[in-house]
Image: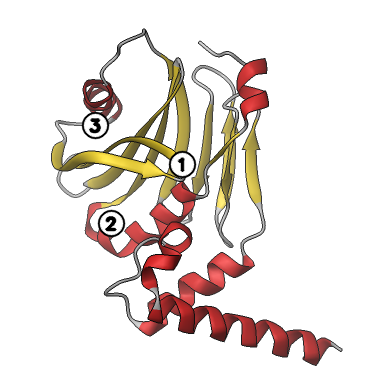
Amino acid sequence: MKKFVLAVALLLVIACLAFAFLFPESWKGLLGDVRGSSPEEIKERVVEAVSAKERAHSKAVGASLGVPKGWKSEIRSVGTPALIVASEDGDSVSVTFQRVPAKTRLEEFAREKLKAGLKEKPTETESNEGRLGDIAGWKLVATHGEKGARRTSLIYVLPRGERYYTVHCSAKADRFEKQRGRLEDIAASLKIDEALEKRNPGL
């Protein structure tokens, strides 16, 4: 029976791998953009996506994220509530929110968050409209930090009524491009609990 289950799981992974390789756009929401990735890289991400069952939930934030195998989650309730998923290598994805005044411009708010949240003067490399799931927002990519400790951050700002959610993906600058797909996968797993939002109106 055990061999049968393993065989079925292996066939499922092979089928997913073939589909992801032939139809990369269909898997973009789950795996990030796999175009240009090697078959080995796609296989690793497919296996991770198929096996990832754990989710981290934060009532204070009113959201949850998928937690890949080998990664850890942290929930902060003191100060600004935050939901954080991080690897042993220092890669991380965090979710926070802030209540904002009406008519706040999304792009301006995103840049203010960038300046306030990153060490040293950040250097933007991307700034455009971005989407996570069915939530349209703004996306920024910037490199920051002192020489020898440079990091690159991918930041999504997502409006939800009076709340602006910030999803902050971060990795060492010299490994960001290699890890970007995985960070985007985790960010794309974001689920916002509308009932928790109503019970925790926030700041």
Residue appearing at x 24%, y 21% in the figure: 112
Answer few, some or many: residues within 10 Å of disc 3's Cα (few below 14, many 20 plus, some between 14 and 19): some
Where residue 66 appears, as percent x and y from the top left, is 57, 51
Residue 176 is marked as: 2
| Residue to which mark 3 is pinned | 119
The local crowd at label 1, few if under 14, some if 14 to 19, many if 20 or more residues have their Cα within 10 Å, is few
Mark 3 near mark 2, Cβ–Cβ under 8 Å?
Answer: no
Kind of residue sitting beneath label 3: Lys
**Mark identifier at residue 34:** none
Image spot of residue 72 (x, y percent): 57, 50
Q: Tell me whether the residue at label 1 lies in contact with that at label 3, contact meaning CB atoms closer than 8 angstroms.
A: no
13 left or right, relative to 25:
right
**Rendering coords of residue 177 (x, y %):** 26, 60
Query: What residue sits right under mark 1 in the picture?
Result: 134
Q: CA distance from mark 1 to mark 3?
A: 31 Å
Q: Earlier in the sequence, mark 1 or mark 3?
A: 3
Spatial distance from mark 3 to mark 2, Cα to Cα? 17 Å
Specify whether 39 is left or right of 2.
left
Amino acid at dot 1: Asp
Determine the secondary structure under disc 2: helix
The structure residue drawn at horizontal position 44% and vertical position 18%, both measured from the top left corner, is 98
Q: Amino acid at mark 2?
A: Phe
For marks 3 and 2 on the same chain, the one whose residue lies earlier in the sequence = 3
Q: Are marks 2 and 1 in contact (CB under 8 Å)?
A: no
Q: Looking at the image, is mark 2 or mark 1 earlier in the sequence?
A: 1
Judged from the image, the secondary structure of the residue bearing numbered disc 1 is loop
In the picture, the quarter occupied by the N terminus is bottom right
Quadrant of the rendered image containing residue 196 = top right
Q: Is residue 119 above or below residue 27?
A: above
